[in-house]
Amino acid sequence: IRVASRKGTRFGSKIPKQFTEICGKTVLERAVEVFEKNKNIDKIIVVITSEYIEKAKDILQKAQFKKIFKLLKGGVTRRESSFLAISSIEESEANVLIHDCARPFVTEEIINDCIKSLEVNNAVGVAIPATDTIIEVENSEIKSVPARDKLWQIQTPQCFRLSLIKKAHEISKNDFNFTDDCGLIVRYNLAKVKIVKGTVANIKITYPLDYLIAESILKERESYKL
């Protein structure tokens, strides 16, 4: 499942960051093509903000992706967009991978590790160990400094058995403190969330500087293919 419905106001562009190009391809294309090429992925659902759905449709059709199953109008919030996509799945049970379109450098290895982990776990998150010291702040003052060796930075995809993530969203319909899908599982104590290790390159494009980093990552990857 591709969640690409947020406009990315922090990016500072007149168009959503999903439609900006990195070395000739949009962020949307680069994010989808990793799943398109993965033999373990059967169907892809793309969720996009309603005012850009025709633009996304045009981009995806020109890219000739074969696994695009549905292109859906997203909700007002990330939680609504996730729920719309999850609810559109017709199977009674399935493995569901929810991924941010703004992370176009997820690898085939990460995807495969997630799917393998779902063979024995009902919920799987992707994360990397935190490299910076993280502080808890209250009233502009440091409240606490958690031990860094226990802190990890969450990435995507976040992966679930369909029945579990459906239950989580149904329970949380009136919960407006949503941060991500794994957070719902933890908050309502529905299952243990197993962690699969991500990569430093699996960045989320949020700020203009991230675009420059993304270009560097892509150029480095392309150089390995020469």
Image (tube, helix red, strand yellow):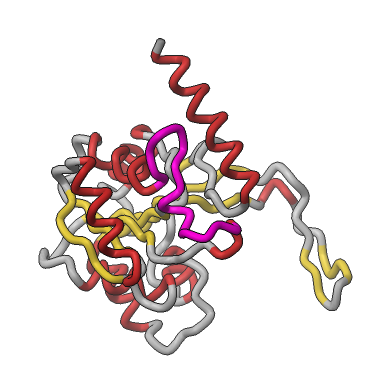
Quadrant of the rendered image containing residue 188: bottom left
Residue drawn at (34%, 70%), measured in percent from left and top? 51
Left or right: 190 in relation to 214? left
Residue drawn at (41%, 10%), measured in percent from left and top? 226
From the viewer's perspective, is residue 27 above or below residue 12? above
Q: Where in the figure is residue 76, as x and y percent of width and height? A: 41, 78
Q: Is residue 21 magenta?
A: yes
Camera-side residue: 181 or 218?
218
Can the viewer see residue 124 in this picture? no
Camera-side residue: 82 or 187?
82
From the viewer's perspective, is residue 97 above or below residue 199? below
Residue drawn at (23%, 41%), measured in percent from left and top? 63
Quadrant of the rendered image containing residue 74: bottom left
Judged from this view, the residue extending furthest toward the bottom is: 174
Residue drawn at (31%, 45%), measured in percent from left and top? 32
From the viewer's perspective, is residue 37 above or below residue 134? above
Q: Where in the figure is residue 77, as x and y percent of width and height? A: 43, 75
Judged from this view, the residue extending furthest toward the top is: 226
Judged from this view, the residue extending furthest toward the front is: 14
Q: Where in the figure is residue 140, as x and y percent of width and height? A: 86, 72
The magenta region covers 12-27
Judged from this view, the residue extending furthest toward the left is: 91
Can the viewer see residue 192 in this picture? yes
Left or right: 136 in relation to 48? right
Camera-side residue: 181 or 74?
74
**Which image quadrant: the N terminus?**
bottom left
From the viewer's perspective, is residue 151 above or below residue 84? above
Quadrant of the rendered image containing residue 79: bottom left
Q: Is residue 223 magenta?
A: no
Camera-side residue: 18 or 149?
18
